[in-house]
Amino acid sequence: MEYKDLLGGKGANLAEMMTVLELPVPHGFTITTDACRAYMYKGWPKELNDEIVRHVAALEKKMGRTLGDAHNPLLVSVRSGAKFSMPGMMDTVLNLGLNDKSVLGLAESTHNERFAYDSYRRFISMYGRIVLGVEGEVFEQALERVRTAEGVRTDAEISSTALQELCVIYKDAVAAHTGKPFPQDPMKQLRGAVEAVFRSWNGPRAIAYRVREKISHELGTAVNVQAMVFGNRDENSGTGVGFTRNAATGEAVPYGDFLVNAQGEDVVAGIRNTEDLNALQRKFPEIHAELMDIFVRLERHYTDMCDTEFTIEQGKLWMLQTRVGKRTGAAALKMAVEMTKPTGSKKTSWKISRRDAIMRITADHLDQVLHPQFARKSTPIAKGLGASPGAAVGRVYFTADAAELAVKRGEDVILVRNETSPEDVHGMMVSKGVLTARGGLVSHAAVVARGWGTPAIVGAESLKIAEDQFSVDDHVVREGDWIALDGATGDIMLGKHDLMASTPPVEFATILQWADEIREGKFSVRTNADTAEDARKARELGAEGIGLCRTEHMFLATERLPVVRRMILAATEEEETDALEELRRAQKEDFVALLTEMSGLPVTVRLLDPPLHEFLPHVSELEIQKATSGLSMQEETLLNAAHEWSEVNPMLGTRGVRLGVVKPGLYAMQVRALMEAADEVSAKGLQPIVEVMIPLTVTREELALARSWVEDVLSDINSRPLPSAKKGAKPSKRPKVSIGTMIETPRAAIRADEMAEAADFFSFGTNDLTQMTFGFSRDDVESRMMPLYLEAGLLKRNPFESVDQTGVGELVQMAVQRGRKAKKSLKLGVCGEHGGDPESIAFFYRVGLDYVSCSPYRVPIARLSAAQAVIGGDKVDTK
Amino acid sequence: MEYKDLLGGKGANLAEMMTVLELPVPHGFTITTDACRAYMYKGWPKELNDEIVRHVAALEKKMGRTLGDAHNPLLVSVRSGAKFSMPGMMDTVLNLGLNDKSVLGLAESTHNERFAYDSYRRFISMYGRIVLGVEGEVFEQALERVRTAEGVRTDAEISSTALQELCVIYKDAVAAHTGKPFPQDPMKQLRGAVEAVFRSWNGPRAIAYRVREKISHELGTAVNVQAMVFGNRDENSGTGVGFTRNAATGEAVPYGDFLVNAQGEDVVAGIRNTEDLNALQRKFPEIHAELMDIFVRLERHYTDMCDTEFTIEQGKLWMLQTRVGKRTGAAALKMAVEMTKPTGSKKTSWKISRRDAIMRITADHLDQVLHPQFARKSTPIAKGLGASPGAAVGRVYFTADAAELAVKRGEDVILVRNETSPEDVHGMMVSKGVLTARGGLVSHAAVVARGWGTPAIVGAESLKIAEDQFSVDDHVVREGDWIALDGATGDIMLGKHDLMASTPPVEFATILQWADEIREGKFSVRTNADTAEDARKARELGAEGIGLCRTEHMFLATERLPVVRRMILAATEEEETDALEELRRAQKEDFVALLTEMSGLPVTVRLLDPPLHEFLPHVSELEIQKATSGLSMQEETLLNAAHEWSEVNPMLGTRGVRLGVVKPGLYAMQVRALMEAADEVSAKGLQPIVEVMIPLTVTREELALARSWVEDVLSDINSRPLPSAKKGAKPSKRPKVSIGTMIETPRAAIRADEMAEAADFFSFGTNDLTQMTFGFSRDDVESRMMPLYLEAGLLKRNPFESVDQTGVGELVQMAVQRGRKAKKSLKLGVCGEHGGDPESIAFFYRVGLDYVSCSPYRVPIARLSAAQAVIGGDKVDTK
């Protein structure tokens, strides 16, 4: 177990500051996370009582003061401290140890009665609120009444007597609300505070935070108990927070806020206006110099930007905590790059390696610099699933047509729908953001928006959408009203919000270039792109090929849908062949554009995958129309076809290669279109590299049959002369086409040895593989069940966001081993959405994949994560 | 490779008859299955030409005659002969070697011109039809014209001259139809016939037969070439078929048919009335005695009943083929049991062991004696999926109500529906058979009918069902018309058919008792039963417990559905609790009846599994009603709920344990009902043994949570005093309840080690496991795709009928190993429909399961198959 696991981040840093860096840190002790875990499983551990007594005794000895002493009492602060900083948990109780007796002692030892009672009333309210669960309002109102009675504006002006009375009022309030007197025994106070910290670990906000941040519920928190120092002692005291560099911009200039004569909570609460480090330098030049020196030592020690809390007590500086500081994406990039150059004076110079620099950048950092962000967010009125990251602001429209019109008028538009379908695409295309009330992270809206990098929120189930307005609770939003979407968090806000632009800083390119150098030849990054436009964008963002081109999108264009339907409805072979011919010509154009864009890079084309009913109208709509206004002959035919092709569980129905078996000629048509396109592109002197991918296979025989269709077309095409290349250009040879399969059913993974016999490559379709391995239909379970499952700890992660390494991952690993054993040259990649998730990318590298493929806007993140995987990951032996 | 694999059944037996038994068999040779396989993959193997020439030369030498000789020609028969007898393939070409020259030689050597030309015209028509593909009608018509011209009634009366002319007419007809003259070169004739045999292996009927009989398409057929002997030489000649025992009844009395002066085809064609063995004895006493002696030797050699073909040529007996004979179920049972007692004279006595007797009975044999069978079947007008075996005859009705009324009038009824739902159950219950146009083998109709042993055919897609009639092609069947269903094959016939009753013979019980003795303590058989009635039936049929009680059926009863809906619609926790309470009372009654029936045997109760929308009306029905006649308030509520709970892929949606998570209290209610029932049954002095099963789990945490719900109820129940037992009876202790889970998702199988931590037993739900492992929604793919897949050889077996051993089976085996490694005492069983399939049962035994569970009417078959598995199966090492 790491130091940090046991002591929590805060405790570990305190220990380091004190013992290694020898900084001025108030004495204290840490109750380890072990105790918290014991508490979670079996309640308060008896042995902890003794431990606390021992710790307190040692602390009292060091400080020469005792808890609750009537003359010179020891006071302590109690802070939670988990391995990872967690805002959802109990923060801090200050001044613990004060009671009716020791408050007198504090007054005596500090010669300041007002200070003593001010501390006591702060303690009662803080302890009452945080530990005993009394509403904060109770104390606020009492304080307000005292201010009124005293005729003063700020708390600092309240008299000592009034504060003394306030303590009595507070204690009564606590007794009234808890049914018990305010605890006077300092040890009892301490145990109460420790238990409150433990409890806060499983508070709903903390759980929600961990789910969001993917922190294990098992870790538990440590508790830090420290002797109090007082920034509110007098005008020669103060408290502040300091960053060793600017956390917003990344500039190597220390930054901080501080307040004279105040305790930590005052700085955070924002009641008084804080001053900056320049003011500190003016008012306390020596302290400032000492702090700057500490900053340098901290940076050198942690080799990173640090965030600190400090207190000045009667002219003496105390460091209360430090940690490696959070930063914006832009700052992270800037700092990481700058820290690779020597920092500090010659004697104390330090720097980090490029590898370290890469490891310090997170996916969120890149996301931030890639997508516009809110300058400031208002409170959300509702929450959905964050389906495509980025901030979007616009006026609400409820149909694609209305959205399109509004954009033509020059408006910024947010398209709001219950759900979207291919018919809404023209409206989605022009909108700043998309919001739907239904659907999960693979719904049409989510997939399309993500493909374009358009911010989107889906499955916002609390929205009630009517014709020209939607409502949430008491809020009603009408057509044309402004709203704002945070596509990362799923937050929906009212009103127009300001956005910060998203021009990545120069360091963005530097870091990614370093990342590319590290993973070169080891792990590549491709993209999922269906159109030339997507392909161009992805190539700009660094994609090294297309790992998945879904050809079904080519079928959905408005002018093609009728042809697709003719193919489905064909009564004779001739009709079917005619329709297929027409589709072939159309598809060929698409392929020409795509292959032109990706010249020199591999393009994996997946043959048609979705069930045919997706190209037909909904049964229920037609049925209703039939029951009301009647159907035309043609509509009646469509209804019959829709009935015929409708399925109970379309996910597990007639799709993928099964379509090829049921509709022979379909796949051959697609391959012909593709290969004719490749020839045309070759003739332009470009270099198309084609990989044909068969979806949803389950047996070797099935794959071998599909492969034979492809090979038949190839041998036919290869028997024709290659169209002559540009004048003067050397006539190029047709490149070898590789033929492979998706591994997306558990059976294909298990029988990967057999599948490999008929495949040149595997691409793991981990979306479907996850659906089938868990029996989770993403459309159905993600919004209803997944939140319950994550909160209850039944799943550690949403397996659609990050690959389930011990279940689905085991199938992937099995398939890699068996596939490679049968065919050493087998190329292996992944094209599910996990290909854009950092943890999944690391896993895929470890088990031996050659590449990941993700949506264009995730490519930079995948490049970074892939490099991090190469740096951090030992490969599993898959021989 | 076995002898039989290479020579085919027929060839191997001929070789044995000739060399081992030294019976009078005409000389000949066999072209092995190797040649056929070579032909299938690469066309006619050149080296085969030489091989045939060599074989023919050897045969000519042995016979002292040559093919095509002008004076004393050799003639041969050519027969196909696969490892397993296959009626779908080419049968026989007789008299091969005849041509315009050798026919004269035959006339010369036999001193019978008429015989020679009769043989020639038979050969031309047979060869023309079978090898060259000329329509048989062509020959029939020519023959008819000759008969008319000659003014005779039978072929035997036709003059030699006319036959000679007929040969010319036949040859011209062949030339006209094939564009080539009839082949005169005997070697060419022979190669043609051999190739025709090879081709027939992949004829559509042969493929269909193999699919039905589960014979591998890879085997190929052998070809048997034998010197001709002539039963049609004169009145001192003849031909016949003989069985060493009665194949219909099993009696140990030889049985046969024969014809004087005839060739084999005449016996089979049924043109002339055959005579029995008594007639043979009268007409040819010495031949009869020789044949009876041969029968005894054959039985002793094969230690089984044999089926033979023989020919008498001018007073000499020749054996043309023999094989172990097919027999009815009743005969199989009778023979198997009788053969365990010494048979034959003292000197030549033989018998088989009980183990052999068990191995000779097939599932089909038992099926036959368990279900009524057709005395004689007419040609089917259509085919569906055979969903529940047995023959049913009745009048057609199209609604459950009409069916019920007709039954009350005393009619036998076949219920015909597009598909059935719980609302049709009262009609299904009283019908002799059920026929649906849609749905697969797990559709409502199939599952319900199978549960009751009612013959059923589902997914008969060619049926067009209107309000009071259905049509197939040109046939129209109206309400009240008679039809007949064969629930084993899926055949649908017109008209009233006679049925043979189904009282199992006494040997049925004997064989099953022997089977039970063999598998005792090694492999048990339970049943899937949801009601006391099913349980009783299954216990009668030998079930040793219930492996799966589906509690959802308890929710579907007419009077309970409204309560279930109240539970689903509940707006407040109180409403939900009320509804759950009411359901608890109702479920308890069911459990009391069930546990009473199964006293002393384990009962595995699966908590609620199906998605909740199954208990709500269909969205589309309500939507149509809304659009036309409008909805009441209550219906509107139902519509909203139906929308809310409707799912895109219900198979992979909110069902199984997920329901328990989404609707807390549901599972606790069910367990409470169950345990209160157990107490009540204990109080009657009976012994309930309860196993609680959690469905559709995917993680250990989920199972542990569900387990805690069960344990909470148990500890609550256990804290109450046990209701006092019957007066005087010893107060019984509550038995320990075991808690386990279905393993039906691939993930649960992969993580079986973790699942085992929270489970006392696993029951493999191989239906769902197959659906998820293949990504096959059975409702969708079984009728549309599966036939295509089986015919194309993409799947060797329908994985829903027999477990896919290398895919799904590997998951089962993995789960067994990992589960047992984590918990040695883990009890393992299977409750998917595979639990009733003989091959699957053998597999489950090999990988180490403790029991199988199947529907009540499959229990006898499972008992037999389980014993056969124990006899034949080595267990896989799963340590």
Image (tube, coloured by chain):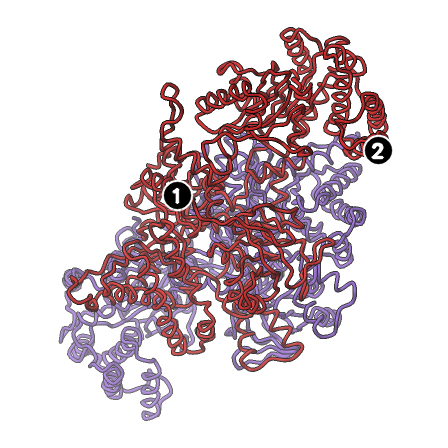
Chain colours: A purple, B red
Quarter of the image for residue B551 reads: bottom left
Label 1: how many Cα within 10 Å (few below 14, some 14–19, many 20+): few
Q: Determine whether the residue tagged by mark 2 lies in a helix, strand or loop.
A: helix
Q: Looking at the image, tell me whether mark 2 or mark 1 is earlier in sequence order.
A: 2
The circle on residue B148 is 2
The circle on residue A483 is none
Depth check, front residue: A797 or A687: A797
Chain bearing tag 2 is B
Against A686, is A11 above or below? below
Q: Amino acid at mark 1?
A: Val
Most extreme residue toward the front is: B282
Where does the image place residue B108, in percent across and percent down from the top left? Answer: 76, 10
Q: Determine whether the residue tagged by mark 1 lies in a helix, strand or loop.
A: helix
Against B238, is B657 above or below? below
Depth check, front residue: B397 or B793: B397
Q: Is residue A557 left or right of residue A804?
A: right
Q: Is residue A768 left or right of residue B161?
A: left
Chain bearing tag 1 is B
Where does the image place residue A692, in percent across and percent down from the top left? Answer: 66, 40
Depth check, front residue: A382 or B632: B632
Q: Do the CB atoms of the residues marked 2 and 1 lie less than 8 Å apart? A: no
Depth check, front residue: B344 or B157: B157
Label 2: how many Cα within 10 Å (few below 14, some 14–19, many 20+): few
Q: Amino acid at mark 2?
A: Thr
The circle on residue B506 is 1
Q: Is residue B732 left or right of residue B667?
A: left
